[in-house]
Structure formats: structure tokens, C-alpha cells
Amino acid sequence: MTTAPSRRVHRRTNAILDSALIIVGAGLSTLFVSTDGNGQNPLPVVAAVLVLVFIVGVVSFVLAWLVRDIALAVLASIVITELLFLLYFVCRVAFSRHVHEHVAEELYLLPFVFAVVTAPTILLSSIGIGRFAHRFFQRRHTL
């Protein structure tokens, strides 16, 4: 079965748009962390952001498989991914043994800082990967 050339071009532009959303989201989070005044090398930050994008991708693919509506799948992906990371940090705070009194303050602020810094990556990657996964599963169900 062949597709019309206009459909192939439309599919290609959608893939480019989705890839651009993912790259811009990861780039903004990397820029936030690398330019916050502490002079941190961007390469380790990029590695951490790519792990974050991978986790967002897994959650988005699973939700696109379970939920047929793309808007609901993307919104659920954003909420679930953010809550998973915040739950991880809250558990880390709850079960850590504080050696120093200032460590407790840092651990309490960590979930909030993480949510602000990773917001562009989670938001834009969920949209891009969710749209890609929706097209992928929609095509598989029509065949």
C-alpha cells in the first residue's frame, strides 16, 4: 500500500516538529542549569536531561498506548512524570539521615527547584513524544 506524496510530506513535517519540541525542551533545561551562575559544565547536564527525556518518553509511549485521545495522553504524561520525580525526591527527603543541619534545607528545596528546572523538558518532550507515539499507535491500529 503506497501513500500519497502529500501525506508523506505531512508525516515528515510532523516528525520534524515533534523532534524540535523535544530538542528545545532539553536545550532550555540545560540552559537553565548551565547558566545559573555556578559555572557548571553543560555536558553532564545534557546527560542528565537525556535520561529525563528517556523517562518522559517511556511514560508518554505507555500512556499513548493506553489512552486514545492525544490531549489526554499528553496531559496525563506531564502530570504522572512530574509526580514520579517529586515522589522520588520526597521519599529521598523522608528517608535520609541528616548529618548536617543545612542538608535538610537543601533536600526540602530540591523538589521545587527540580520541578522548575525540568518543566520545559517535561512539558515539550511529553508533547513531542506523545504526538509521535499517538501517530505510531494510530497507524498500527489501522493496518
Image (cartoon, rainbow, N blue to C red):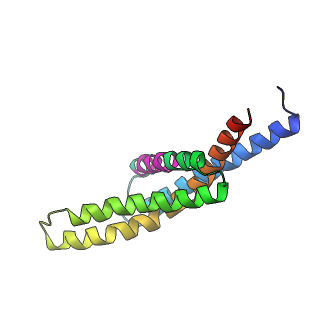
User: Residue at image x 50%, y 49%?
Assistant: 59
Q: In which quarter of the image is the C terminus?
A: top right
Nearer to us in this view, 39 or 5? 5
From the top left corner, tell me how far across and down residue 125 is, in percent: 57, 53
Image point 39% across, 52% down: which residue?
A: 41
Q: Which of 46 and 82 is in front in this view?
A: 82
- State which region is magenta: 45-57
The spot of residue 47 in percent (x, y) is 42, 46
Q: Is residue 55 magenta?
A: yes
Does residue 78 sit above or below 116 in this rendering?
above
Q: In which quarter of the image is the N terminus?
A: top right
Q: Residue at x 39, y 68 (%)?
A: 113
Residue 36, percent across and down? 42, 66
* Quarter residue 96 falls in: bottom left
The secondary structure that most of the magenta stretch takes on is helix
Side of 1 relative to 48 (left or right): right
Query: Residue 123 in magenta?
Result: no
Is 111 situated left or right of 29 in this image? left
Q: Can you give x and y, in whole percent of width and height, for residue 20 in the image?
A: 65, 50
Q: Which residue is drawn at 33% across and 67% down?
A: 110
The residue nearer to you, when weighing 139 against 4, is 139
Question: Quick check: can you spot residue 51?
Answer: yes
Front-lying residue, 41 or 136: 136
